Structures are given as C-alpha cells and as structure tokens.
Image: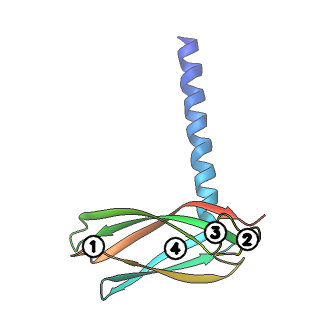
Amino acid sequence: MGFKKAKDMKKISLLITAFILISCVNDTVNTKFVEIKNNIARFDIVNNSNKDIEKITFEIKYLDNLNKLLLIDTVDYQMSKESQKEKRPFLKANDNTFIVQSVPDNCKKANIKVLEIDNIK
C-alpha cells in the first residue's frame, strides 16, 4: 500500500510542477479580447517581461452569443524566419501590440491564451 501512495504522490507533485511552470509563462504576457468588427477579432498583447519575444503561440476559442464553442485555433506569431541568423522580436520587452484574426460565422466573442513563448537569447 505504501508503494502505491508514493507513486500517487509523485504523480501529484509532477502535476503541480507543470501547473506552476505554465502559470509562470502566462504571467509574463497578458492577452485580452477587445472586439469583433467586420468578422475580424482584435486581441491586445502586453509583454510584461524584460525579455524580447521572438515567437509566441496562442490558443483562440471562438464563441457564439450563447458561449457555444464554434472553433479552437492555434496560431503562431513571429517576425523572423527560422532560417534567419539574426532574430527579430515579435514583441519587445515591456511593450505591447495587437493581433487580428478572422472569425467563423456567428462568432460574437473569443478567448485567447498563451501556449508557448520563445524569447530571444
């Protein structure tokens, strides 16, 4: 019985560690859905860190007026190509920008979250 508890505790501690790491990533960048106009959603992006972001990956959930999920999309933003030697930031340290995405029919709002951040080293 003790061996099973130890394995369970190990799984729980790994899960807690993963949550901590994920929340640390998202604390450095704030995202906010702003509006939809002409089937285009606008999102504000704020980099609260002291590091330039080379590439950032978002998950966007598009919803209708009853909060029914219409589409989940994963999108990457970066300014430089993988093959370029000199990396250009998508978003500089302590700066802000916005992104726009086309929305599916009947979309009235959207949620956005950061999945991954690659900082310029």
Do labels 1 and 3 touch, CB within 8 Å? no
The residue wearing badge 1 is 104
**How far is mark 2 from mark 3, CA to CA?**
8 Å
**How far is mark 1 from mark 3, CA to CA?**
28 Å
Q: Nearer the viewer, mark 1 or mark 4?
A: 1
The residue wearing badge 2 is 87
Disc on res. 81: 3
**How far is mark 1 from mark 4, CA to CA?**
20 Å
Q: Locate residue 92, reporting x and y percent.
A: 70, 78
Amino acid at dot 2: Lys
Q: Nearer the viewer, mark 1 or mark 3?
A: 3
Amino acid at dot 1: Pro
Q: Locate residue 10, reporting x and y percent.
A: 60, 28
Amino acid at dot 3: Lys
Q: Secondary structure at mark 3?
A: loop
In the image, residue 25 above or below residue 86 = above
